[in-house]
Image: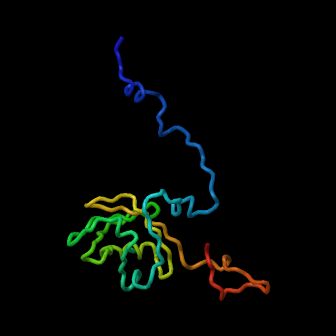
């Protein structure tokens, strides 16, 4: 009788793992969570910020706060490859250290436009990978324009002039 490795026995098995029925995951009822747009932080370094007019059109300059720049390579004159992941998409760009003011390259514009970012939107940058040659952030977008149904009501009815204070 011929001897076979365990890998061969598994690979010759009649059932493929990819055709096995996967258990259904119950929906949370919130499309942004179900689609992977929001997630709990993993404990890695992160920074949250509110976009100002300089971060969106027409200027498109994104400077990372000092809290995060201390975690990143000091690129000096050389830019470092950077990847931003948001949902199921990725954007490649460069990050410049001290000499370029700790900001992302012009490709930041594509990230802003593709995600329809506006002044007042919140961003959470979670640092997934960091080396002397590459940084990778997972980005969550928290929209600054709340739907009317989320605006608080006073005793006399709707009051859309009051801002919403979170947490």
Percent of width and height locating residue 69: 35, 70
Q: Which residue corresponds to the image point at 79% horizontal and 84% vertical from the top-left?
A: 155
Count of numbered circles in the view? 0
- As drawn, the residue found furthest toward the left would be 77
Left or right: residue 40 compared with residue 8: right
Colouring mode (rainbow / by chain / secondary structure / one colour):
rainbow
Q: Which residue corresponds to the image point at 75% horizontal and 83% vertical from the top-left?
A: 154
Left or right: residue 80 compared with residue 15: left
* Viewer-side residue, 18 vs 25: 25
Percent of width and height locating residue 18: 47, 40
* Viewer-side residue, 155 vs 8: 155
- As drawn, the residue found furthest toward the right would be 155
Percent of width and height locating residue 21: 56, 40
Which quadrant is home to the C terminus? bottom right
* Viewer-side residue, 5 vs 67: 67
* Residue 43 to residue 93: above or below: above
The answer to which quarter of the image holds residue 77 is: bottom left
Which quadrant is home to the N terminus? top left
Percent of width and height locating residue 162: 66, 86
Left or right: residue 45 compared with residue 142: left
- As drawn, the residue found furthest toward the top would be 1
């Amino acid at each position: 009788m011929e001897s076979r490795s365990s890998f061969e026995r598994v690979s010759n098995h009649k059932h493929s793992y990819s055709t096995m029925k996967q258990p259904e995951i119950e929906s949370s009822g919130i499309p942004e969570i179900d689609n992977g747009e929001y997630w709990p932080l993993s404990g890695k370094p992160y920074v949250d910020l509110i976009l100002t007019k300089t971060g969106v059109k027409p200027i498109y300059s994104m400077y990372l706060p000092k809290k995060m720049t201390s975690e990143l390579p000091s690129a000096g004159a050389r830019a470092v490859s950077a990847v931003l992941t948001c949902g199921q998409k990725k954007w490649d760009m460069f990050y410049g250290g001290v000499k370029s003011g700790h900001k992302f390259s012009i490709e930041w514009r594509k990230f802003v436009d593709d995600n329809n970012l506006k002044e007042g939107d919140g961003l959470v940058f979670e640092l997934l990978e960091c080396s002397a040659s590459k940084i990778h952030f997972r980005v969550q977008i928290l929209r600054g324009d709340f739907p009317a149904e989320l605006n608080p009501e006073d005793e006399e009815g709707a009051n859309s002039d009051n801002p919403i204070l979170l947490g």
